[in-house]
Amino acid sequence: MTDDYNFAYLDEETKRMIRRAILKGVAIPGYQVPFASREMPMPYGWGTGGVQVTAACLTPEDVLKVIDQGADDTTNAVSIRKFFQRTAGVKVTEATAEASLIQTRHRIPEAALTEGQIVVFQVPIPEPLRFLEPRETETRKMHELEEYGLMHVKLYEDIARHGQIATAYDYPVKVEGRYVMDPSPIPKFDNPKLDGSPALMLFGAGREQRIYALPPYTKVVSLDFEDHPFEPSKADHDCDLCAASDTYLDEVIMDDQGGRMFVCSDTDHCRCRREAGHVGRLGVAA
Amino acid sequence: MDAASLSGGFADTAREAARAFRASLDAMARPGTLHAVTGALPPAPLSPAAGALILTLADTTTGLHLAPSHDVAAVRDWVTFHTGAPLVGPEAAVFALGDWASLQPLDRFPIGRADYPDRSATLIVEMPALAASGVRLTGPGIKETAQLSMPETEAFVQNAQLFPLGLDFFFTAGDLLAALPRTTKVEAL
């Protein structure tokens, strides 16, 4: 670590502003708190919101894990992990169970989260109604009046057109029976993990300047209809490396003959299973 | 201004503020849990926990209301020197600080607007003591139920009914703090 940076990069005044927004977010679950997002030394879309929330929450004692679509070893995850190693000097890990703070882009780890852990989500578009109503003044009014009929019309149109709700990620949820919230572009497979989670979940959208939160043990319901209930979905395969049948899978194209394999998107979970002796179709016994 | 008001701030601002914030975040996310915060040595009657909260959250952009119990020269000088927070009346408060009796009546504080429920005051209530026993708490952040010693019940029942508007509370005693967001349902046992 270098002392050229303030602890966790941001200046103290910025951290206070973000911290106040986080506390209000926790007090009003699912409500998007505006905050004065700063420029960060990375482009928008690379997790500037998540990085600011992480910077405001980190303590020197934290153990940080960063994942990008479940993987610890992709560019986004590696660069954010290095950023905080350098500016905050915190310990880092790839093991979900060892981490006290997990910053994630578009996945929730497969391993069960525990009390005391904080998950920070990177959010591109925090407003679940934005693609239905582009005006911020209108969507704010809709949240104020709890007027979410438009979202149900959208889900209904999915059913009318495709025979089922075709939204596979970014699937809207209702929090504590009040605010409709965008869970960030996690696959809907992960939506059930939001409900009643023992971990605190914080959401940061840098370009859109919003922070919102789910306290632990908060009721989170994925929107659906009685005759078309919500169904978390995944590829209908087992992991080809660790044989897991209950994890979210990535499809990897192997050649130009149509060859493909399915592997766990959560690299840490897959590694732990292989180390425990599970071998998939294309796996090699350890 | 007394020279004593120049001391008692965080020695290592970034790290101590980070720890104090994490304690207050855990407290707000898990109502009824008690957390120790250290690092601030404010003048009496301000407790170390309340002092740490002020140092961590208040600055020149947040109006601070000192209730009569804490509206003394030593506290005014200390808060002003260390945070620069403007001292304001209850209707303009982002934070308010005092004991329970002197913070009354609560309806003077902003509870947020229907379109911006976050624009509400956070009250820091100084308590003689804090314990994880007393009234029963349920709601987000609490697995089944929790308990917390609180000054009364009725005010918090009414505050929860305002949701999504309402006030949020920190309770402090010595170096301990606990929190109660507007979502928590409070029942007398």
Image (cartoon, coloured by chain):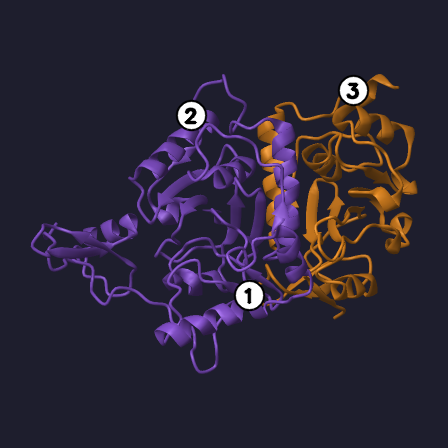
C-alpha span from label 2 to label 3: 33 Å
**Which chain appears orange?**
B
Tell me whether the residue at label 2 lies in contact with that at label 3, contact meaning CB atoms closer than 8 angstroms. Answer: no
Quadrant (top left, top right, bottom left, bottom right) of the C terminus of chain B: bottom right
Residue at the spot 72% in from the left edge and 39% down from the top edge: B49
Q: Label 1: how many residues lie within 10 Å, few (<14), some (14-19) or many (20+)?
A: some
Q: Amino acid at mark 2?
A: Arg
Seen from this angle, which residue lies furthest left?
A257
How many numbered tags mark residues here?
3
Residue A84 x/y as whole percent: 44, 31
* Image mark 3: chain: B
Q: Which residue is mark 2?
A: A86
Please tell me the colour of chain A.
purple
Instruction: Say if B73 sits above or below A277 in the image.
Output: above
Near-viewer residue (B102 or B117): B117
Q: Dot 2 falls on which chain?
A: A
Give whichever of discs 1 and 2 has the lower sequence position. Answer: 2
Q: Position of residue B151 (x, y in %)?
A: 82, 57
Foreground: disc 1 or disc 2: 1
Q: Chain of mark 1?
A: A
* C-alpha span from label 1 to label 2: 38 Å
- Residue B33 seen in the figure: no
Residue A265 relative to residue B76: left or right: left
Q: Is residue B118 visible?
A: yes
**Residue bearing the label numbered 3:** B6
Query: Quarter of the image holding residue A78?
Result: top left
Q: CA distance from mark 1 to mark 3?
A: 48 Å
Q: Amino acid at mark 3?
A: Leu
Q: Residue at x 45, y 19 (%)?
A: A2
